[in-house]
Structures are given as C-alpha cells and as structure tokens.
Image (spheres, grey):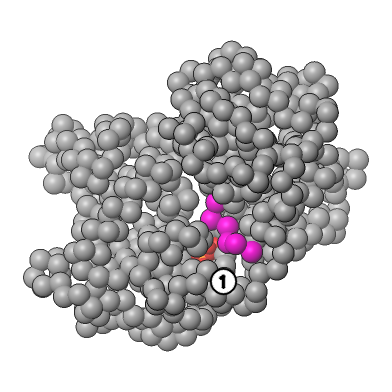
Amino acid sequence: MVSSVRERKNGEVLLTVSDMTKTFGPVTALKNVGMTLKRGDVLGLIGENGSGKSTVSSIIAGMQTADSGNMTFLGEKWEPQSMLDALENGVGMIVQESGTIAGVSVAENIFLGELSQFSKFGIVNRKNLNEAANSVLRNIGVENVTGEMPMAALDFQARKLIEIAKVVMKEPEILIVDETTTALSQHGREVLYKIIDRYRAENRAVIFISHDLDEILEVCDTLTVLRDGNMIRTFEKSEFDADDIRTSMIGREMQGDYYRSDFVPTREDEIALKVDNVVVSGHVNGVSVEVHRGEILGIGGLSHCGMHTLGKVMFGAVAPDSGKVVLSDGTEVKNEFVAMKKMLGYVSKDRDNESLILSASVKDNIAVAGMEKYAVNNFIILDGREKKYVDGQIDSLSIKCSSRNQAVQTLSGGNKQKVVFGKWVGRGSEILILDCPTRGVDIGVKQAMYQLMVKLKGEGKSIVMISEELPELIGMSDRLVIMKDGKVTKEFQRSKDLSDAEIIKYMI
Ligand SMILES: Nc1ncnc2c1ncn2[C@@H]1O[C@H](COP(=O)(O)OP(=O)(O)OP(=O)(O)O)[C@@H](O)[C@H]1O
Ligand SMILES: [Mg+2]
C-alpha cells in the first residue's frame, strides 16, 4: 500500500480533481468541479440535497466514473476501476446508503471478498475469522457487536459501524464519510470523530459530508460548498461563518423562522392516540403516552432507549408483548393495515429497508399510500389525477428528480427522504409518526418540513416526532417525552428556557 512507502508530510497535495463533469440522462450532477485535498486536512462538503456531494465522492472512491475531467492521487493519474481498487490503493469511502449485506454474519461483512485468508482447503476457519473481526471492531471502539452475530440482528446504527470498521481497517490515506453521522447516535459519532482526529494527526485526509452545519464547523478545517453540481466556494477555517455558508449553499439568504416561533404548548382536548403500558421485550419496558389532536409530541433519547421501537408499535408494525395502542374511536392499532385504514402515517428511520420501494419510480412510491385521494371511489385510477397528485407532492417538497418516473434508488439521499415524507403527508394522514424525519435533509427543506408540521398541527392533526437531535425536539415539540432503557424518564412542556443540558440528564 502507498502509505507504507512514503512519509506523510503535512500540507502535501494528496488528491486533485479538475474539470469533472457527470450527467445522468437529462440531469447534470457535476459541472466542471475542481478541488484539492492536502494531507492533514479534514475537508467538509456541504450543499443542498442533490447538489452533487455523493456523486463527486463516489467518483473519487471508484464507485462510478466521470464523463470528463481528471483526478490525481499523490501526483499520479487517479482512475480507480472499482471501490475495492480504490480502497486497496488508498481511498476509502463510507457510503451514504446501506453498504452491508443482510444475509451473512458481521465478520463475513467485514472481510467480504477476503475470506480466503481465513480458509484452508476451502474451509473457512470461523474462529479466526470472528476473532479478527472482533479485533477490528474493538480497535475503533465498538464494544457490543461481535463477529459471529448475524447482520440481520443488528440495528441501523450498528450496521453503519460495521461499514466504518470495514473501510478503516484498510487504513486508507483518504477517508470519505458521506452523511454517516445522522445514522449514528452520540456513541457512534464519537467513534467516528475519534477516527477523523486520528486521520488528521497522522497527516492522512478526510472528506466529510454532513447537513449539520454546526457539526461541520466543528469537525472540518476547510469547507467546500456545492450548488446544483457547481463548486461555489471554499471557506477556510478563519472564514467559517454560519450565515455566509448558508447563503452560499442556497444562493440566497434564509428567510423566516427555522423552528416554530411560539413557545406556548398548545393542543386540542381530544386524545388521538393512546399508548397503554406497552412492553416489547428487550426494547420497551412499560410505556404509556397520549398524543392529542393538534399536538406535536417529541420523543427523545439515545438510540437504544426504545423510542424507535415505540414508533413502530404506534404504527402497528411491531406487536407489543403486552399493552396496546388505541385510537380516539376505541380502535386498537393491531397491525399496519388498521393503521393505514385509520389514516396513520409512519416515516421510518431506516428508509431504504422500511419505507421505500427502491426500484420503483418516485410516482409509484408516492402514489401507493395516497390512492383514496385521487382514485375515483377508491378503485378507478385515472392516470391524470394520479400524476397531478404526485406532482403536487414533488412540488411542495421540491423533490429533485428528472421526472416523476425516475427510480427512487437513483435519487440523492435527502430526496429519497422527501419522497417518504411526501407519501404520508400528501395522503392527509391524521396521525403522523415520524422517526428521524429530517435525516439527511438539507436546511432549506428541513425548514419547509418544520413549517409543514406546524401547518398540520394547525389543522388538528397529531404528530409524533422521534428524534436524536435535541435542537429540533426543543424547537418543535409542544411536549417532549424523554426515554431511557425502555422507559419514560421525564416529560417537558414546551418552553423558551428548555436547554440541552437539562434534558440530557434524563437520557443517560
Ligand atoms: N444513478 C443515477 N441516475 C440518475 N440520477 C442520478 C443518479 N445518481 C445521482 N443522480 C442525480 O444526481 C444529482 C446529484 O446527486 P447526489 O447524490 O450527488 O446529491 P447529494 O449532494 O449527495 O445530495 P444529498 O444531500 O441528498 O445526499 C441528483 O439530482 C440525483 O438525482
Ligand atoms: Mg448524498
């Protein structure tokens, strides 16, 4: 590997990209993009959803090729043939969308394509394989996952940590981290930040993509802004200014409030949904909460506190071992069919596996939940009405797609999330259960989503927002329930004085 034969000199140019262009049919994802990455640098990439961040990164990492342009790595032409080729030669990327395989074990995922080093006469030595995987995981600070575990048994965050381990194990000179932190809770983030700090200290380099401006300002040394496939500007650390960066991202100043502007908790008297002493073994340990009409109920906690499971129980997607979820008319939400019929909507944290049909079009994904809105007698689908319905959602959330027929899997990460949101909101859901709804969504669209939530609240709808981001919980909730170890530990009312510090005490 390159690293072993060269001294790592701070400031040495590692990678250059010049004049890079990439189109997908009618979409121009990158236009004459250029950048330089030096040793010891943590370079942030920021830009709206669909601005080209993942595209440029994935070309650098060998996942796809550009239409035109040049790259150099350590002074030589850089033309990786595949991600594996890039990784073997010093450039590794933790991809935005799921990069692990569900059907096999953790260790097999980590050593995918390299099992031969653990086998003799074609038989894999499981013990050695698992031990090697364990040591890779412990090395980056992951404690509670072991090599023999089946991938399918891991949650979203643990799967992400496996991806990180798999790439970092190869000790690339350049590590690209694409929108990974939103999939991680505090512990997972710390694992990643530690790796990034080490890369800086060792004079390697990192390209870090995130929509969290505060995080980017904290983690990065320089910051490059992309807009519609164009490189707009690079900010040096001394020039970091949140407003300037936002303006250069969206091409204008942000107008209006980001979160809700009022600080008075309001709701209607009617209880829309009641969670009654729900137990899900190992996850939820006797939780009761009520959601009123016209209320935004926030649920916060660390990622394993049970709140994500609770969201699934509310939508009937997970059956509790005991306890129940009941609606205002007495209906028990026993399964998703009942939930759908009763106009509940659910945005899952794990959108690729639980919320979207990836191979289907934007149109079909949005239309699937909203049929009663556009079909005559809930039965006859008139093409024109369906299209109009779908286009309405594409417009209102500014979903960036070349047409309503574009396959969802080819949308940028944040635009996928908008499709999920549009699917349920457009349907007119009375109760919306949103699990990390703004994950991977850019600030402009986040603002639009928050405004939409306030509007829905005003219409008497109920919103449950499960989130790992305290600012949005504080910013949006009428009431905020905090969970820890499967139990509710505290409830806060909306107030101007609510602070992170006060809440965190009840989370850990
Ligand atoms: N395989 C593909 N087929 C068609 N269009 C694509 C494909 N891959 C990317 N695009 C389009 O290229 C544009 C740039 O996408 P990219 O994924 O780079 O955005 P991004 O900046 O990473 O956004 P996000 O913040 O939402 O992840 C988008 O309009 C996207 O729909
Ligand atoms: Mg992306």
Evaluate whether residue 277 shows in this view. Answer: yes
Determine the residue positioned at 18% across, 40% down. Answer: 135
Compared to residue 184, the image places residue 257 above or below, namely below
Q: Residues within 10 Å of mark 1 (few under 14, many from 20)?
A: few
Q: Quadrant of the N terminus?
A: bottom left
Q: Amino acid at mark 1?
A: Asp
Provide the major secondary structure of the magenta segment: loop
Q: Which residues are magenta?
A: 439-444
Q: Is mark 1 within 8 Å of ligand 1?
A: no
| Residue at image location 43% in from the left, 36% down from the top | 155
Q: Residue furthest front?
A: 497
Per the image, the residue denoted by label 1 is 243
Image quarter for residue 335?
top right
**Mark 1, secondary structure of its residue:** helix
Residue 239 image position (x, y, % from top left): 44, 77
- Name the residue: 56% across, 71% down: 243
In magenta segment, residue 440: yes
